Image (cartoon, rainbow, N blue to C red):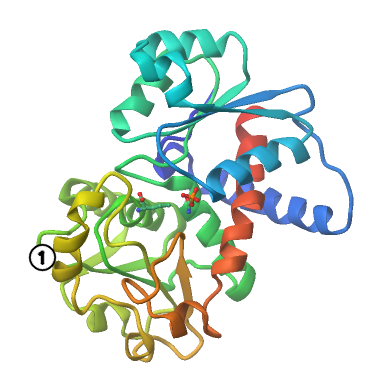
Amino acid sequence: MRHFLTLLDITPDEARHILKRAAKMKRQLKEGKACRPLEGKTLAMIFDKASTRTRVSFEVGMYQLGGHALFLHSGTTQLGRGEPIEDSARVLSGMVDGVIIRTFAHDNVQRFAEYASVPVINALTDTTHPCQILTDVFTYEEQRGSIEGKTVAWVGDGNNMAHSWINGAVTFGYRLRIACPEGYCPDSRMMAAARALGADITLTHDPLAAVADADLVTTDVWASMGQETEQAEREIAFTGFRVDARVMSYAKPDALFMHCLPAHRGEEVSADVIDGAQSVVWTEAENRLHAQKGLLEFLMA
Ligand code: CP
Ligand code: NVA
């Protein structure tokens, strides 16, 4: 029994296996062929935060895999009224075959996983968003081939997405260049841990330096869920960190642009970039379904 709380919970070989299966299942789906390895299995989906892509992709993914998904908004469960995470983990483990959790503190998913006897998947915490990086690597490789040795530029907040790109540099072997304003850098311990595992990661405060010759440019909102009250001060702090056509012009001519979405046009990304020819954000969003089906099969079949 395995959990997927960060990318470091699976080996590079396992990640490769998941993406290979995801590609095969995507092809089969487009050809109208059924693939139902999770027949009779149920996934509980606990959400403490809003979601469009994650909720829909896991729910549709379970259906296509032959199983069933159960949406549990914390506000309408006893968890939301203070029933301990440890108790909820043991109760749900008796009835379902897997659990995904989107919550605030990363410690919540760790505690849930510790007491669960079924696989637990991190569907985003304040600290990481590993399912998205699995998808983003899948999407890059679909378009451009292996990401190993390629340069990924992260421009913006040192947030949950940035942290998962850091872990992904260990798993997938890309070079990661991060540009963040001072005071908004990723967790230095996570960077140090990834470097100790061989990841090539550099941190700068200059977006153009990070993007120079990059194969993939990516960003995310300046204020994540739970940081809404910081929006105004963050807009000031992130001045100069918008990914616009000038920033993209420093990357390789065939560089791709990605954003996990939802995006704020005119803030972290200009409309001409996100809606432009280098952007693959719609394929990236669709691929949440395919990449996570690979993950669900790996953990639950
Ligand atoms: N990218 C992502 O996780 O989107 P949702 O918040 O809509 O799930
Ligand atoms: N960093 C964003 C990602 C949303 C998918 C957030 O946590 O709100």
Q: Which residue is mark 1?
A: 182
In the picture, measured across the screen, residue 24 lies left or right of residue 243, that is: right
State the residue at coordinates (32%, 55%): 166
Tell me where residue 113 sits by quadrant.
Answer: top left
In the picture, measured across the screen, residue 29 lies left or right of residue 106, that is: right
As drawn, 108 above or below 26:
above
In the picture, measured across the screen, residue 293 lies left or right of residue 255, that is: right
Q: Residues within 10 Å of mark 1 (few under 14, many from 20)?
A: few
**Residue 65: % across, % down:** 76, 37
Where, quadrant-wise, is the N terminus in this rendering?
A: top right
Ligand 2 near label 1 (Cβ, under 8 Å)? no
**Residue 269: % across, % down:** 37, 75
SS at mark 1 in the image? loop
State the residue at coordinates (28%, 51%): 194
Where, quadrant-wise, is the C terminus in this rendering?
A: top right
- Identify which residue, 94 or 235, lies in the foreground: 235
- Residue type at numbered disc 1: Glu
Tell me where residue 145 sits by quadrant.
Answer: bottom right
